[in-house]
Image (cartoon, helix red, strand yellow):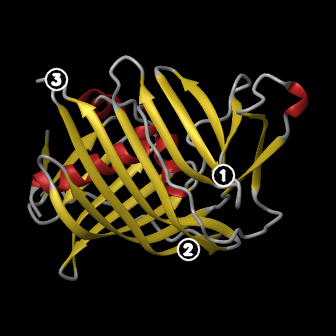
Amino acid sequence: MSNKFSVGLLAICLIWFSACHKQRTSKRNKNNPVADSTLTQATQPVIDSATAGTPANAAPVKINEIEFNYLTAKSKVSLVSKSQNFDNTNVNIRMKKDSVIWLSVTGVGLEVARGLITRDSIVFMDKIHRDYFVFSYEQLSKQYNFDLNFDLLQSMIIGNLPFEPQSEARFVKMNEFYVLKQIVDRLEVDNFISESNLKLSRLKAIEVPTQNAFTLDYEDFKDVNNFLFPFTSIINLNVKSLKDQQVRETNMRIRHTKVEMLNDSPGFPFSVPSSYKRKK
């Protein structure tokens, strides 16, 4: 694995997880819903698109969200962009809610890279070339023209709403979806909640000044500890380069082969050897 591949994989993952702060979209799931009284429920009024503005027609929508202490996932990542192209790269993910995201990239049976994302920083080791990178959220936000933070990364991994519903947020009934419309900073965000299972199934976001666009489709929902979890995410990112003002397109697929929610820590081993060189 080259340095370019290592950094590219991490950066694209970060963009995907956080693109809500610029835009994204998810796709509705057609699987049967899983009933569970323990699901976290976010409630907002609904305004039917045909009767918008009529308070008497408002009704509550309870969005099914995932609660967990620790989470592990085995995943395959595919990516096509101007500078990157790889297929079904193996990535293992471990998480501690609101605290740590741990990534391990393997190839031909060997670990080739490892990453640790905390609320303060992101560290990524290239074990083939024996070097490492340290990023701040501010650095990556400037480099990729996206506002990044830990909460956005976490929410995108588990498929919960990336932004808390604001008091002025509203739902609009649109075909088989309840669409939660939000304005967050410079973003116009549409969260598509499936009528069949009340899960976030599609998300669209557009940054108003630049028209940068990100779409994310959640697919293949499966029951994990009585929660519906999206096992496939298909991402399309269109961002105008700050250097040449050309629109760059990135397409990415993340497919989880196994997801577990745990009460006990799976461990987050991460130590940079003293022989490794820091890259910038």
Under mark 2, the amino acid is Glu
Q: Residue furthest bottom?
A: 109
Relative placement, left or right, of 163 versus 11 is: right
Whole-angstrom CA distance, mark 3 to mark 2, is 42 Å
Estimate how packed mark 2 is, as few (under 14), some (14 to 19) or many (20 or more) residues with alpha carbons within 10 Å. few
| Residue that numbered label 2 is attached to | 260
Relative placement, left or right, of 215 versus 189 is: left
Relative placement, left or right, of 40 versus 146 is: right
Q: Residue furthest front?
A: 50
Whole-angstrom CA distance, mark 1 to mark 3, is 37 Å
Q: Quadrant of residue 165?
A: top right
Q: Nearer the viewer, residue 6 or 274?
A: 6
Residue at image location 43% in from the left, 35% down from the top: 23
Under mark 3, the amino acid is Gln
- Residue 15 lies, in percent from the top left, at 34, 43
Q: Quadrant of residue 195?
A: bottom right
Q: Nearer the viewer, mark 1 or mark 3?
A: 1
Q: Nearer the viewer, residue 72 or 165?
A: 165
- Badge number at residue 176: 1
Give the mark nearest the N terminus, 1 or 3.
1
- Badge number at residue 29: none
Estimate how packed mark 1 is, as few (under 14), some (14 to 19) or many (20 or more) residues with alpha carbons within 10 Å. few
Residue at image location 17% in from the left, 64% down from the top: 127
Under mark 1, the amino acid is Glu
Res 36 seen here: yes
Q: Nearer the viewer, mark 1 or mark 2?
A: 1
- Residue 73 lies, in percent from the top left, at 46, 70
Q: Residue furthest right?
A: 56
Residue at image location 14% in from the left, 38% down from the top: 280
Give the mark nearest the N terminus, 1 or 2.
1
- Residue 256 lies, in percent from the top left, at 43, 70
| Residue that numbered label 3 is attached to | 245
